[in-house]
Image (cartoon, grey):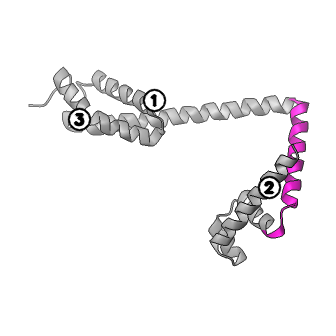
């Protein structure tokens, strides 16, 4: 006889069996306990609403699928909100002459700070931050070790920070 998930005692057993594991899974994904707990509750609520349609043998798979889909939906929504927010900020900033002036001044400071870096640091900084090369690629291209690239980059970042702070 098929076990009926609509039975409260059986449902509680399922909850007790999988809630902790599902919460860990969601926490790993969200990196936020509140979000993990919210989706955990939503997942079990959805299971309860569909208790007559979900087979007992597939309950774990169902819970993790529902939870993962909820996670993906939330992340998609966050991306849409972020993109909309960026667009609104860009539109506001485009219209602001003050912002354009501040942005221009800041970019000039950045360019000057990069130009004032020692040559070897500037070379690594530009390859890493502007050309988006990995340290290993930079090391191969320059014929130096990855450690040397790391050291040059660390020094470049410290010098860059000092120069940008000076211009404030």
What segment carries the magenta color? 96-120
Instruction: Identify the mark at residue 92; answer none if there is no mark.
Output: none
Tell which tag, 2 or 1, sits nearer the viewer. 2
Q: Dot 1 lies on which element? A: helix
Residue density around tag 2, few if under 14, some if 14–19, many if 20 or more, within 10 Å: many
Q: How many numbered badges does the structure rendering display?
A: 3
Residue 110 spot, x, y in % from top left = 84, 51
> Which residue does the image show at 71% across and 63% down from the upper left?
153
**76 sits left or right of 34 in the view:** right
Majority secondary structure of magenta residues: helix
- Which of the pair 67/18 is nearer the observer? 18
Q: Are marks 3 and 1 in contact (CB under 8 Å)?
A: no
- Give the crowd class for mark 3: few <14, some 14-19, many >=20 residues within 10 Å: few
Eyeballing the image, is 147 above or below 16?
A: below
Quadrant assignment, res 80: top right
- 151 vs 55, left or right, is right
Which residue position holds label 3? Answer: 17
> Within the magenta stretch, is there residue 112?
yes
Query: Under tag 2, what secondary structure?
Result: helix
Contact, mark 3 vs mark 2 (Cβ under 8 Å): no
Residue designated by label 1: 34
Residue 126: x percent and y percent? Answer: 77, 61
Q: CA distance from mark 2 to mark 1?
A: 38 Å
Mark 3 and mark 1 lie on one chain; the one further toward the N terminus is 3
Q: Which mark is residue 160?
A: 2
Q: Residues within 10 Å of mark 1 (few under 14, many from 20)?
A: few
Query: In the image, residue 142 lies at what x, y percent?
Result: 72, 75
Q: Nearer the viewer, mark 3 or mark 2?
A: 2
């Amino acid at each position: 006889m098929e076990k009926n998930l609509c039975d409260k005692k059986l449902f509680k057993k399922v909850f007790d069996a999988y809630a902790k594991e599902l919460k860990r899974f969601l926490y790993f994904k969200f990196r936020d306990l509140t979000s993990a707990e919210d989706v955990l509750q939503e997942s079990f609520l959805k299971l309860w609403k569909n208790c007559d349609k979900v087979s007992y043998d597939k309950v774990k798979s169902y819970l993790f699928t529902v939870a993962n889909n909820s996670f993906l939906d939330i992340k998609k929504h966050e991306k849409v909100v972020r993109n909309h927010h960026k667009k609104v900020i860009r539109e506001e900033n485009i219209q602001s002459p003050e912002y354009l002036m501040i942005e221009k001044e800041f970019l000039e400071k950045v360019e000057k700070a990069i130009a004032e870096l020692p040559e070897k640091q500037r070379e690594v900084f530009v390859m890493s931050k502007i050309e988006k090369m990995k340290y290993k690629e930079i090391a191969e291209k320059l014929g130096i070790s990855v450690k040397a690239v790391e050291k040059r980059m660390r020094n470049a970042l410290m010098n860059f920070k000092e120069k940008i702070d000076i211009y404030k």
